[in-house]
Amino acid sequence: MSTVTATSSAVRPPAERRGRTITTRIPSRIDRLPWARFHWRIVIGLGTVWVLDGLEVTIVGAIAPRLTEAGSGIAMSSADVGFAAALYVAGACTGALLFGQLTDRHGRKKLFMVTLGLYIAATVATAFAFAPWYFFVCRFLTGMGIGGEYAAINSAIDELIPARNRGRVDIAINGSFWVGAAAGGLAALVLLDTAILPRDVGWRLAFGAGAVLGLGILLVRRHVPESPRWLFLHGHEDEAERIVAQIEEEVRHETGEELPPPGAAVTVRQRDAIPFRELARTIVSRYPRRALLGLALFIGQAFLYNAVTFDLGTILHDFFGVSSSHVPYLFVVFAAGNFLGPLLLGRLFDTVGRIPMIAGTYLGSAAVVAVLGLLMRGDHLTTASFMALVVAAFFLASAGASSAYLTVSEVFPMETRALAIALFYAVGTAAGGIAGPVIFGALIHSGDVSKVATGFFIGAAAMALGGIAELRFGVRAEQQSLEDIARPLSAEEADRAAGDDGHEGLRLRERAETQRATAARHRAARHDAAAGLAPAPAAGLVVLEIRAQVAELRALALDALARGCDERAAGRRSRSDAERTAAFDRAARSDERARDYTARADALAAEHGVGGGQNGPADAGGDGEDAETRWAQARSARERALAARARHDEAAAAHEDEDARAHGRLALAAEERAQAVSHDAHAARLHADAADEEPAVRHRRAAERAARIDARRARQRDGMRRFRPGVGTVLFSPGMLGTAGPSSRFAAAAEAEHDREVEAIARALADDGGADRAELLRRVGGRHWGPGRFPSALRAALREGRARRDAQGRYEASGPRPPG
């Protein structure tokens, strides 16, 4: 269930509900589901788009020669065919970027229906092509549809598939491209056979076949729901709850068993849309290591794949003497190896882990391709051995290439998921996908087998760089919730909202103290007027008392609002649903009390025709004497009155009694003025505290805390845990790396000490200025920390932005002085 901080969403339209903070277990409820028919619907309805892409690319490649022949019904040259292929790739990159952003903004389902519709319409239109320019436009639009599908489909699949199955499913689905490729190659043999179909009809039916398959997929997709993760983030938590409840009920009915309890909840601040600039900045500047990883993986696989796929037929024909009629059959063998790789290796990405499998497939395929290049240069290959090495290399490379899409889909925040896929696909395809065929094509055209071998070496190097990047920057994402891998931006906004509530509470208490000072000054003025030291208002002394009461009621209302802010801040920070709900309930009761006090103040002011009591009278009353002196004077007057009565001088006694009452009123006035000064001083302190908690300062401190937490989680995921062995052991240094589990008290103590060491480095640089490494080591006493601890803490301070290194190699503070 979801917990919200405002009125029930059932009575508010989504546009009014955005901006609220909600807590939900929807991600953990999705991740706990066992595999069921619902997940097969997701695979069939969404995953088959890769089959379409493979079919599209292969059929167009097969029919290309037919388009240049006389009698084809369209007059195109070989250059026109190449230009059309380039436009298809350009359209895919454009569609990925355009529809990727729209997918994050308007929802997964809307866009995967729109992009598939665009693909179907453009493919059908291509079948009726009559001129090159018309064919070019249709190919560009078809590419836009396919490129948009990549962003919408992969984000939806990863958000709907349970965490323990996400790797194998995503990789197998991306590998299904080669099912379409094999089908396209076989279909082309029939569609281009002039004994079966006329020369100007077969290639048109090839495009029609893709459109028919796309239409079938479109019908299945009608039953695929919107991503519940996207829904609750954009103010539709009721619909998200309904969809997840339906899925759970279907799974229970199918399995006949109760579902396990869900995991941790996530708290987010709902938003309508996030600007493209903020999304791109998040991907590139906030996660630079993951951005480099995504680029390396995509460029490596795009270079190798596009180079070999586009030129495989030419290599077989020119260097191994394979006839053109037999090339399609060998291409089917090549496609089968590419599909079997993701299918058979996919489950290992969830069990063995992302980093070893991604690095292994990239580096393994690079090694096989390098061996292929060496044997080719030495002229030691036959057609069979060449194909065996190619199939072996791409058996691994296909799983690695599929994991590139998986990686960029799961290592960035939920709000940027579709855009991340689109961005890295577009950049990788534009760089590797264009450079690969160009370089390979030029090398093949030379006719020199050693130069073709050099092309394979370049492809192996590109894949090897991807594998090295995975080893250096990879993320252990196997069987983890997407929200744990990359915290949603809106979850951090919820943390900032808690800080904003605390800041608002300070401001409200400051105003409450100002109101109490106002009430005290009104009463001081009343006492001064009663003593005859100041003129009374025309309506009488009661007006001053009413104004004081109104100010006090408003102060109580402000106090109640401040308590409500504190409760909401505590609720947003709470990890327990029960505690969070209780805190929000207490906040609602405090808000109700505030409204009651405000209503009483307004009614009292209206009844007596006085103002709101916002401003007290000027402190002109009194003669500067304090309350203690006035009370002493009142006691002296009462003593004189008693003495006069003892003398039976009633007139003098009455005069002294009046003097005592006057001094008493002036004493009360002095006390009220002292109270006013005290309230003003308290308000000034609260104002200073609030100024110290301004949003920029508070958000900086929150960002520092979040960076430390993210760094700690990264170390835990990478298995690089610091630990302190027990007393009496030889291995005593917390700086050593070990295998202490996350719950180990040694690991917890070492983590806390590591954070203190990072803080000491940051504070030394902020307090005493920049220093070289040796000086910084001396300042913080790092030589006494233990083996490896100072270098580790210094690296962490640089990585977390607590310190920076200038051009001379000196270390400087990266920002303001650390808090404390």
Image (cartoon, helix red, strand yellow):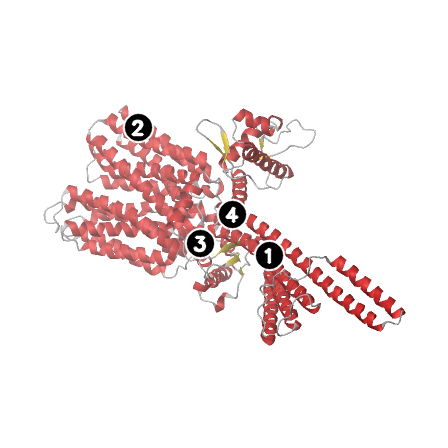
Residue located beneath label 3 in the image: 160
Determine the CA span between mark 1 and mark 3: 48 Å
Above or below, 329 against 261 in this view is: above
Residue 434 lies left or right of residue 574; in this view the side is left
* Residue 172 drawn at (x, y percent): 39, 46
Is residue 242 visible in this depiction of the protein?
yes
Residue 284, image quadrant: top left
Residue located beneath label 1 in the image: 510
Dot 1 alpha-carbon crowd within 10 angstroms: few under 14, some 14 to 19, many 20 or more: many
* Residue 694 drawn at (x, y percent): 53, 50
Question: Which is more foreground, mark 4 or mark 1?
Answer: 1
Question: Which is more foreground, mark 1 or mark 2?
Answer: 1
Determine the CA span between mark 4 and mark 2: 54 Å
User: Looking at the picture, which amino acid does disc 1 mark?
Assistant: Glu
Name the foreground residue: 19 vs 628.
628
Dot 3 alpha-carbon crowd within 10 angstroms: few under 14, some 14 to 19, many 20 or more: many
Determine the CA span between mark 4 and mark 3: 33 Å
Label 1 or label 2, whichever comes before in sequence order:
2
Determine the CA span between mark 3 and mark 2: 42 Å
Above or below, 94 against 318 in this view is: below
Label 2: which secondary element: helix
Label 4: which secondary element: helix
Identify the residue at horizontal 61%, vertical 55% (top origin).
Answer: 683
* Residue 493 drawn at (x, y percent): 49, 52
Determine the CA span between mark 4 and mark 1: 22 Å
Residue located beneath label 4 in the image: 699
Do the numbered discs 3 and 2 sit on residues whose CB atoms are within 8 Å? no
Label 3 or label 2, whichever comes before in sequence order:
3
Label 4 or label 3, whichever comes before in sequence order:
3
Residue located beneath label 2 in the image: 373
